[in-house]
Amino acid sequence: MANRDIITANVDVAAPPAAVWAIVSDLKRMGEWSPQCRRMFVRGGEVAQGTRTININRQGWKVWPTRSYVKVFEPERALALKIAENGTIWTYELEPTETGTRLTESRTAPNGVSNISNFLTKHVLGGTDNFESGLQRGIEDTLARIKAEAERTAA
């Protein structure tokens, strides 16, 4: 099966964009929210456009590193990371609402997914359909965890 162009979900958070942004933009804490990206090492200090990271990902007993850089950094609006190994882009978009913030997380593949990544997904990570279904569930879990933290800290 071909890679999905987009995998996405959103959640309404009863907290202002500033509170949600503080969580989303603190990449060192990504392992607290994401069930797959278990750790991010931020290179060069403060997170800004162009910041590079080294990421440790996990699926069951399988662990693998990836590298990314911050492609978009618009405080309280959008943060996007491009993954070097597969060319995908992970984006967090924040939209103010009457009750707080709508947070959307997306994984896009604007130029497709790299051949090596597709090979490894097929032969090591359970196949594209299973892997991408797991990414969908992971996005939903990540958003739920961020929502809980933002609402807890904003209360």
Image (spheres, rainbow, N blue to C red):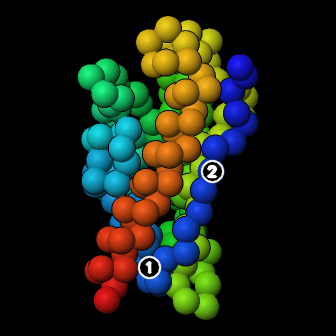
Residue 1 visible to the viewer: yes
Residue neighbourhood size for the residue with mark 1, other residues' Cα within 10 Å, grouped as few (<14), some (14–19), many (≥20): some
What percent of the width, then of the height, locates residue 95? Answer: 62, 74
Identified by mark 1, the residue type is Ala
Q: Residue 108 bears which disc, if any?
A: none
Q: Nearer the viewer, residue 2 or 133?
A: 133
What percent of the width, then of the height, locates residue 154? Answer: 34, 85
Residue 70 visible to the viewer: no
Q: Nearer the viewer, residue 129 or 21?
A: 129
What percent of the width, then of the height, locates residue 28? Answer: 28, 51
Query: In the displayed structure, does residue 101 sit left or right of residue 66?
Result: right
Q: Nearer the viewer, residue 58 or 65?
A: 58
What percent of the width, then of the height, locates residue 116? Answer: 55, 11
- Say which residue appears at 60% left-offset and 43% top-offset: 107
The quarter of the picture where residue 102 lies is bottom right
Q: Residue 18 bears which disc, if any?
A: 1
**Disc 2 or 1, which lies upstream in sequence?**
2
Say above or below: 74 vs 63: below
- Say which residue appears at 61% left-offset and 91% top-offset: 98
Q: Residue 8 bears which disc, if any?
A: 2
Rounded to the nearest whole Å, what is the CA distance between mark 2 and mark 1? 22 Å
Query: In the displayed structure, does residue 38 sit left or right of residue 114?
Result: left
| Quadrant of the drawing holding the N terminus | top right
Identified by mark 2, the residue type is Thr
Residue neighbourhood size for the residue with mark 2, other residues' Cα within 10 Å, grouped as few (<14), some (14–19), many (≥20): some
Identify the secondary structure beneath mark 1. Answer: helix
- Say which residue appears at 44% left-offset and 79% top-offset: 18
Q: Nearer the viewer, residue 120 or 84?
A: 120
Identify the secondary structure beneath mark 2. Answer: strand
The quarter of the picture where residue 88 lies is top right
Query: In the displayed structure, does residue 48 sit left or right of residue 121?
Result: left
Say above or below: 67 vs 108: above
